[in-house]
Amino acid sequence: MNFIENEKYVSEYSLKLFVVLSKAYASVSEAVLKDIRRYGLNPTEFAVLELLYHKGIQPIQKIREKVLLKSNSITYTIDKLEEKKYIERKGCSKDRRVTYVSLTELGKGKMQSIFPSHEEAIKEILKALSEDEKKEAILLLKKIGLGISFHT
């Protein structure tokens, strides 16, 4: 196989991989979204609650970074979760610009009741792969993500 044929071969598989990866992501996302909605939450609310459930009290800025939200979107989400009494805000005594967010007892109870079944739903969604295949997929997807260089 000469260089031009090799480039075409690489290009064909790159495009095919992109299409398959995009379709798989869409299918998995749709299934996860369906599961999250069973609990009366939207994906952003669930992501915030899950972060607080697993990592404990967090500054709003850190939540925004971890959940990948714009500033106005995180404020809206925090407001909604506070209205539902799942979270509470606490000002920082050392820096008035910083506000922490933590789960309330109601929020902890909600996550304790729903997270195990959500975790089972994720396992069910990804059951087509063996544990070894999941490990390999994680490594390969990380390799893709880390290997991207953006040209501007």
Image (spheres, helix red, strand yellow):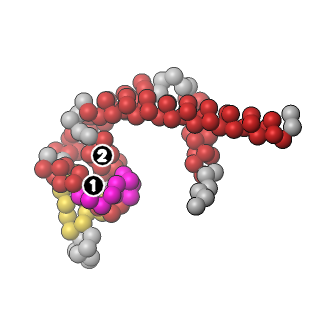
Residue where numbered disc 2 is placed: 44
The residue closer to the viewer here, 3 or 140, is 3
Which type of secondary structure does the marked residue at label 2 adopt? helix
Q: Main secondary structure of the magenta part?
A: helix
When the figure is inspected, residue 84 is found, relative to residue 23, above or below; the finding is below
What is the secondary structure assignment of the residue under circle 1?
helix
> What amino acid is found at the position of numbered circle 2 in the picture?
Thr
Q: Is residue 148 magenta?
A: no
Mark 1 vs mark 2, CA separation in Å: 9 Å
Q: Which residue is mark 1?
A: 73
Task: Measuring from the top left, give residue 80's x and y in whole percent.
Answer: 17, 50
Q: CB atoms at circles 1 and 2 under 8 Å apart? A: yes
From what the image shows, is residue 143 above or below residue 59?
Answer: above
Q: Is residue 26 left or right of residue 139?
A: left
Give the magenta part as a residue range.
63-75
Quarter of the image where the C terminus is located: bottom right
- For the residue pair 77 and 139, the one nearer the viewer reads as 77
